[in-house]
Amino acid sequence: MTMVISSVHATLFARASFFCQSSGLRSFRSCLPFSSSAASVSSHNLSRKKWRQPVLSVLDLGGVKISREDVVRDDPANNVPDNIFSKLGVQLHRRDQHPLGILKNAIYEYFDTNYSNKFNKFDDLCPIVSVKQNFDDVLFPEDHVSRSYNDTYYIDPQTVLRCHTSAHQAELLRSEYTHFLVTGDVYRRDSIDSTHYPVFHQMEGFRVFVPEEWEGSGMDATLFAATDLKQCLEGLARHLFGAVEMRWVDTYFPFTNPSFELEIYFKEKWLEVLGCGVTEQEILKRNGKPNKVAWAFGLGLERLAMVLFDIPDIRLFWSNDERFTSQFSKGQLGVKFKPFSKYPPCYKDMSFWISESFTENNLCEVVRGIAGDLVEEVQLIDNFTNKKGMTSHCYRIAYRSMERSLTDEEINDLQWKVREQVQSKLNVVLR
């Protein structure tokens, strides 16, 4: 289960607009917009909807065209901006010479070597999923914070960009897969700093056991699965980081019980590597696996790659600058990144009276929508409430390009546009 969770998700982890069919699985190769030509969808009781022609751009995902207007819609429930749409189909994790692809393949190597190619691998599943897949199938409560429009990108009320690769767990189980690794790009509205980005990459591992495997072991099913899980992941940590000290921390996830986090002592501090646990029986029962037990783990590729490759800023993973891309080669895990420049940041402060509807995630979405990857950090540096009960926030925005120097004129223009959009879109009053 994908359990490496951003701070917003720290406690845990229809009318579908896209019907993606490929041997029962959703994949980029057949991520189809639901339209009048998709006759096979009728059995799913999905209401027909007329699709408009693309205006700005079209993605070709495995030969299937997805238009901008299929994802960025004039729908009150839609909160997907153009800068997020532009990341669909990039699939950094499938590039063998990219740090994320190198790390993914190193993990594949560990499982292939130690489990005789038992694990099926999926890294091309469609990131457009239903709310049921993303939340209900993995037991997220109805009132869980991650379901909010503040945290998740909604295409329409029943369709989202997946928040985690666990969104595919149920369909894989129903398709009779019992050992699998799922890697993919995931999407979350989040803060802006050197370790957070609204698009990142996760890998989930899942293994199902039958009674014959634990009977006679002297352990009950849950203890047997937990023991096997810890042995597997301790081996993976050694494969990636070498002979490091490790510790297990008990935690909580809605989809596993018991649940754990694995930490390693690396570079003189404890580092959380992944989350994991024994899968809740309800998930197995719902998907045709009664009387069985399973384990699951999830890890964030960027989080580990930043440590293994010494990459200081998460934005660099998206760079096409040859000074970055040329430093990495297929199969070379842990090559240390050599900074090719250190341009100075430019700081701009902005103060405003907030409304009850204000959230920091909404602010970050506005700033990203204007400045893109030129914004390095948005930080709350001051807040107070006056005698009238009005609350003021002051945010410091750091602008910095990873590839060039920014001019004063360029920064001032960005900041002016940010101020205009913040006031008009977020219902705040600038000070």
Image (spheres, rainbow, N blue to C red):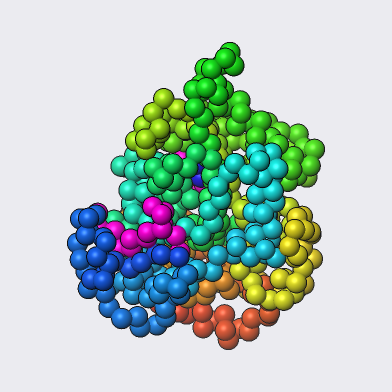
- State left or right for residue 217 relative to residue 293: right
Tell me where residue 413 appears, x and y as whole percent: 51, 83
At 51% from the left and 29% from the top, the residue drawn is 209
**Residue 426, percent from left and from top:** 35, 66
Q: Residue at x 61, y 25 (%)?
A: 227
Does the rendering let one see residue 195?
Answer: yes
Tell which of 279 and 308 is nearer to you.
279
Range covered by the magenta-colored residues:
5-28
Q: Identify the residue at image location x=77%, y=55%.
A: 334
Q: Position of residue 163 (x, y in %)?
A: 45, 53
Mostly what secondary structure, the magenta segment? loop
| Residue 249 visible from this viewpoint | no
Residue furthest toward the bottom? 409
Inspect the magenta stretch and tell me whether residue 176 lies in it. no
Q: Quadrant of the C terminus?
A: bottom left
Residue ID at (64%, 59%): 100
Q: Nearer the viewer, residue 344 or 296?
A: 296
| 125 sits to left or right of 115 | left
Front residue of 172/87: it is 172
Residue 320 found in image quarter: bottom right
- Placement of 34 over or under 219, stated as above or below: below
Does residue 264 appear to the left or right of 150 in the view shown?
right
> Is 22 in the magenta?
yes
